[in-house]
Image: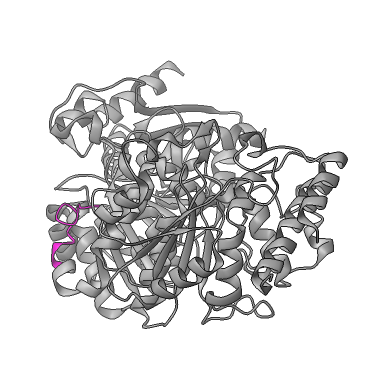
Amino acid sequence: MYQISKKTTRIWSRMGARAVYGQALSGMATENKNVLALSADLGRSSGLDRFSKEYPDQFINTGIAEQNMVGVAAGLARSGFDVFASTFAPFASMRASEQVRMNMGYMQEPVKLVALGSGLAMGFLGNSHYGLEDVAVMRTIPGLTIISPADCAEIYKTLEACIGLKQPVFIRLTGGINCPIVYQEDYAFEIGKAIWLRPQTNITVISAGTTVGHCLKVADALMESGISVGVLNMHTIKPLDDAAMAAVIHRSKTVFVVEEHTKIGGLGSAISDYVMASGAYTGKLYTHGIEDRYLTTGNYPFLLKENGLDAAGIEMFIRTHLGKQ
Amino acid sequence: MQTTNHVTALQIRRTIIETAAQCGEAAHIGGSLSMTDLLNTLFGQYLRHRPNQPDWPERDIFILSKGHAVLGYLSILHHYKYFNAKKLQTFQQNGSDLIAHPVKKISLGIESSNGSLGQGLSYGLGIAIGMNKRNQDRRVFVLMGDGECNEGSVWEAAALAAEQSVNNLVAIIDQNGFRNDGLTSTYTHKAQLASIWRAFGWNVLEIDGHDNQAIQTAFQKACDHLKGPTAIVAKTIKGRGISFMENNNDWHHNRITASVLDDCLKELGV
């Protein structure tokens, strides 16, 4: 069991998304012997070190072989285990993308594939390790649910929702240590149901992953200037929440999508596709994400700032576009 | 004297040829004929399965990783009455679920979707590990081609299976010596396929994949081997059973016309 409180979320924030993933899964493995963790030799980088020592029968290091890991995970998931297979985001989504397509897409084997350190969180490890295309690649696979938790509490919520779930899920973990805190008390989480963190107004900011936390800061700053902005946590990137999208289409006049992902094919594209297909959206839509290029490298805060994805950068983007209207 | 096994294999080859002819499209014939004797013995004697209860929880699992040889697989499943002739005749017809590669449908005896080479061993390995974790006395058999062994993912799975000493996993390599564009030269020149499997830590049995006695002995040894995974590297002849198709890669993927069909049936004599 876990408790979402001011105290726990502060601790989790300091630990960061990857360590919290390992800790959360360990807790679930204690209660549920059906839970298996697979890692492509990144157990120590995903908080699974303790898991592997405490529950050796529930852990497999598949070696540095992501394609095989996904196939093995599928065989185990087919046999009724709750399988969580993890590696860094580009290796999960691209090195093994065809295995994901055949096993988790075509055969719908209910693997939970966890993309660690997605977005810019890999910092100095560079572009080879950044997860900037994972959503775009995974989104094209039919029947694959994509979830990006907004903070560490939502990682717990996501894993809990995935236990016993007979469908494949790609779980995208963003953020480094000192993760933004979005939730400090328990709340209702349901896969596919987006959450309004600030009530809807004419201006709507939609985000997923740890950029949600930055967007909340921006909303608060804008409020001080008398600009009221709704913030929607679209934790489930696929399938998009129809009810939330209907509200956006019919009530929002300006929509900003903020994502730690290339602007090609990610959440911004998904929202854009959706509202265009509706034929009913008459407002403006702006996507704020990573440009179509390889990035200058630095630590995570540097990268967020350089790419305008820290709170200051997001606020400037929104103010600039609102000013143009 | 012809054995029952031999007669059954002839019937299955006839089904392959007739179904290919009947569908009116090109089909993968050579690789279906090369594995027929292996599959015939496996399904007839070693694979624990119940055609009248395809989802029998205690069954062994067969995965056709070289999915393009599906016609040989479907002909076996038809022989064991997983489905009738009418169903088989939908092979490669618009809208059918019996197409040029297996599509997972356990009610038809098809355990896995394949077609993208090099993926069946990983999936089978996961199933085999799962069986062991649940203390089930069940095995997984994965049939691959020698050309398929070009795929790097095969060796990722081979390494892990050996490392984990997965003793209920049997890989069958239908080494017919050809891939799409010609000879599988990778494993006939400097690197010998059986040696590679052995180097990866597998129990390796090298046999003539058309010698029924040798096939039986190999499956028995594979089932008896409890220390780790076994690879049966079976030398076969692509197009086996039809003289003009044997070692003739034109029949890797080709259409059987009415006159070709006549020639085939004369040769098969069943």
Q: For residue A18: magenta?
A: no
Q: Nearer the viewer, residue B66 or A177?
A: B66
Bounds of the magenta span?
Answer: A39-50
Q: Which picture quadrant has residue B130? A: bottom left
Tell me if residue B83 can be seen.
yes
A205 vs A324: above or below: below
Left-right relation of A60 to B60? left
Pinpoint residue B86: horizontal percent, then vertical percent: 84, 62
| Residue A47 magenta | yes
Q: Residue at x 68, y 59 (%)?
A: B74
Which residue lies at the image location 45% right of the left edge and 72% below the top edge?
Answer: B217
Color theme of the render: one colour
Quarter in which the N terminus of chain A is drawn: bottom left
Q: Nearer the viewer, residue A115 or B2?
A: B2
Q: Main secondary structure of the magenta part?
A: loop
**In this picture, residue A322 sits left or right of residue A85:** right
